[in-house]
């Protein structure tokens, strides 16, 4: 892992995500971590009218100092766990998505770590519009950490894949890099919806899947039907999975979980972190 961005708004959810980052740092070598906080809310009530731009908001200097202090503490905590890691902390007035894109102009981002916000008695995590934007952009590997999930070592990973066009998007190299770093026990589950592919297509994609991953000695399973999310969660619980890994299409099976209105919040039923990989 060369460069990881940790996104924080200093919430409880972000703290859980940071604990996961600390756990990873204790177990693996991370060269560079960028801790990023957006102050875009200062601009939330300002807009352009034709060629006239309203003046920028007045920045609350006390709040800025508070942000600096919190970022400094996070940086020190991470350096205590992993002194070999180069850690920097940034804040600006950009939106989170624009801030990440700005960072990516100068850094190759290997992973973005972000918390899933909140939980209720139904075990739902709400996902804000920023996380939705990151998911829908499908530009970066994302580690989504649920708030109710305690920090733990990753021992068992479930790779949930839709076989359709899998050879174009399965990040085989990344998966084997993960294996080298974490020595995981792998479960591989096909989550195709029943009847979507022909027998010939299934055989071709299954052959590619096995030739790519058999050396990991994974346990293979197949889940079919409309309520894939529920079946995945049941599998995760039954097999004590620590990490759910997906390689979704840009608008694939898992991405559909996040396509509701951001104003209503978006629910993800998970008790383990989700790692969404890009090709």
Image (cartoon, rainbow, N blue to C red):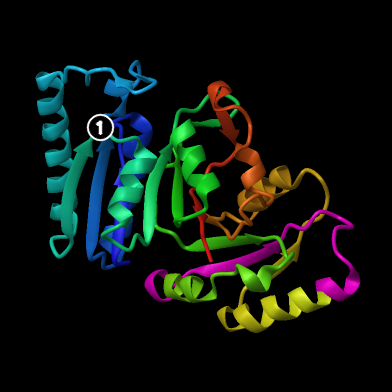
The x and y percentages for residue 160 are 64, 59
Asked whether residue 219 appears in the rendered view, the answer is no
Residue sitting at x 22%, y 61%: 32
Left or right? Give the position of 57 relative to 49: left
Residue sitting at x 35%, y 20%: 44
The x and y percentages for residue 47 are 36, 20
Q: Is residue 181 magenta?
A: yes
Viewer-proximal residue among 247 and 92? 92
The x and y percentages for residue 113 are 37, 49
Residue designated by label 1: 93
The answer to which image quadrant residue 227 occupies is top right
Whether 201 is drawn above or below 61: the answer is: below
Which element type, helix, strand or loop, lies under badge 1?
A: loop
Q: Which residues are magenta?
A: 180-202
The x and y percentages for residue 70 are 16, 34
For this orientation, the residue located farthest to the front is: 51
């Amino acid at each position: 892992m060369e460069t990881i961005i940790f996104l924080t708004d200093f919430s409880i959810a972000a703290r859980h995500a940071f604990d996961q980052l600390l756990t990873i740092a204790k177990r693996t070598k991370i060269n560079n971590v960028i801790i990023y906080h957006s102050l875009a809310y200062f601009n939330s009530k300002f807009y352009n009218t034709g060629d006239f731009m309203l003046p920028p908001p007045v920045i609350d200097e006390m709040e800025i100092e508070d942000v600096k202090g919190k970022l400094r503490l996070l940086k020190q905590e991470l350096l205590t766990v992993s002194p070999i890691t180069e850690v920097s902390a940034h804040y600006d007035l950009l939106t989170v998505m624009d801030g990440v894109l700005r960072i990516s102009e100068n850094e190759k981002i290997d992973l973005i770590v972000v918390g899933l916000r909140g939980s209720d008695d139904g075990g739902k995590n709400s996902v804000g519009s920023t996380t939705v934007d990151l998911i829908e952009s499908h530009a970066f590997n994302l580690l989504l950490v649920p708030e109710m999930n305690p920090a733990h070592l990753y021992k068992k990973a479930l790779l949930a894949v839709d076989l359709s066009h899998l050879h174009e998007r399965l990040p085989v190299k990344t998966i084997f890099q993960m294996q080298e770093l974490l020595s995981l026990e792998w479960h591989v589950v096909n989550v195709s919806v029943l009847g979507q592919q022909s027998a010939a297509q299934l055989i071709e994609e299954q052959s590619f899947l096995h030739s790519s991953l058999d050396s990991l000695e994974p346990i293979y399973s197949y889940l079919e039907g409309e309520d894939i999310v529920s079946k995945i969660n049941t599998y995760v619980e039954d097999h004590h999975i620590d990490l759910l890994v997906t390689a979704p299409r840009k608008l694939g099976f898992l991405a559909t979980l996040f396509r509701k209105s951001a104003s209503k919040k978006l629910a993800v039923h998970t008790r383990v972190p989700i790692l969404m990989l890009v090709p």
